[in-house]
Amino acid sequence: MHGPPPRGADEHSLEQLITTHLHLIHHIVNKLTARLPRHVDRGDLWSAGAAGLVDAARRFDPDAGVTFSTYA
């Protein structure tokens, strides 16, 4: 799950990419909780979403022609 930062990215820009897109986790968690049983913990969904966002930020290639929001 840990990979090198994207080409040309330093830790600060990686962190900025992640924090700028935290709203994506909120959006997905809200969509999922509407379909899942009530006993599913939102915190667990947030944790999984955050891990996925970090992984996507590390693997993202801005030269691929898609936005980060779409990629993530």
Image: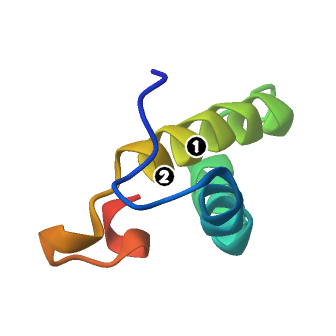
**Mark 2 secondary-structure assignment:** helix
Percent across and percent down for residue 9 are: 49, 59
**Can you see residue 36?**
no
Query: In this rendering, would 54 be left or right of 44?
Result: left
Query: In this rendering, would 55 be left or right of 54?
Result: left
Q: Residue at x 45, y 21 (%)?
A: 1
Query: In this rendering, would 61 be left or right of 8?
Result: left
Q: Which mark, residue 12?
A: none
Q: Which mark, residue 54?
A: 1
Amino acid type, callout 2:
Ala
Percent across and percent down for residue 54 are: 58, 43
Amino acid type, callout 1:
Val
- Nearest the camera: 33 or 15? 15
**Mark 1 secondary-structure assignment:** helix
Which quarter of the rendering shows the C terminus?
bottom left
Q: Which mark, residue 57?
A: 2
Going by the picture, which residue comes out furthest to the left? 64
Query: In this rendering, would 2 be left or right of 27?
Result: left
Disc 1 + disc 2, Cβ < 8 Å: yes
Residue 70 sits in quarter: bottom left
Percent across and percent down for residue 13 are: 62, 65
Q: Residue at x 61, y 34 (%)?
A: 51
Is 51 rendered above or below residue 57? above
Mark 2 burial class by Cα count in 10 Å: few <14, some 14-19, many 20+:
many
